[in-house]
Amino acid sequence: MNTKRWLLASVAVFVVIAVLEFFIHDVLLSDMYRQTASVWRPETEMLRLMWFLVEFIAAGLVAGLIYRPR
């Protein structure tokens, strides 16, 4: 496996995941989240629970599946 290619693909997948999560949660679903705020945890606690490291590891695994040796 080409390590440089895998690393660049991992970063690209991570960026795509981050952009999609922003668009889905902060643009499309933000009104619904405000309307049902009593059901959700406080925003400070939700932000503390976000794990960008886990997302980056998942991106690396996805890229590894794409560029695995045959």
Image: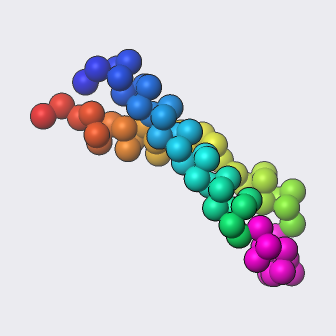
Q: Is residue 31 magenta?
A: yes
Quadrant of the rendering where the N terminus is positioned: top left
Q: Is residue 54 visible?
A: no
Q: Position of residue 44 (x, y in %)?
A: 87, 57
Q: Work out whether residue 42 or residue 66 is closer to the camera in this orientation and state it.
A: 66
**Which range of residues does the magenta coloring cover?**
30-41
Question: 20 left or right of 65?
Answer: right
Q: Position of residue 48 (x, y in %)?
A: 78, 51
Question: 3 left or right of 56?
Answer: left
Quadrant of the rendering where the C terminus is positioned: top left
Question: 40 left or right of 55?
Answer: right
Looking at the rendering, which quadrant does residue 49 occupy?
A: bottom right
Looking at the rendering, which quadrant does residue 10 occupy?
A: top left
Q: Residue furthest left?
A: 70
Position above or below: 58 against 40? above
Q: Position of residue 34 (x, y in %)?
A: 84, 74
Q: Is residue 23 magenta?
A: no
Question: Which coloring applies here?
Answer: rainbow
Q: Position of residue 65 (x, y in %)?
A: 29, 42
Position above or below: 25 against 65? below
- Number of numbered discs on residues: 0
Q: Is residue 1 visible?
A: yes
Looking at the rendering, which quadrant does residue 2 occupy?
A: top left
| Residue beneath the point at 64% across and 61% down | 24
Q: Work out whether residue 70 or residue 20 is closer to the camera in this orientation and state it.
A: 20
Position above or below: 10 against 39? above
| Residue beneath the point at 69% across and 67% down | 28
| Residue beneath the point at 47% across and 40% down | 13
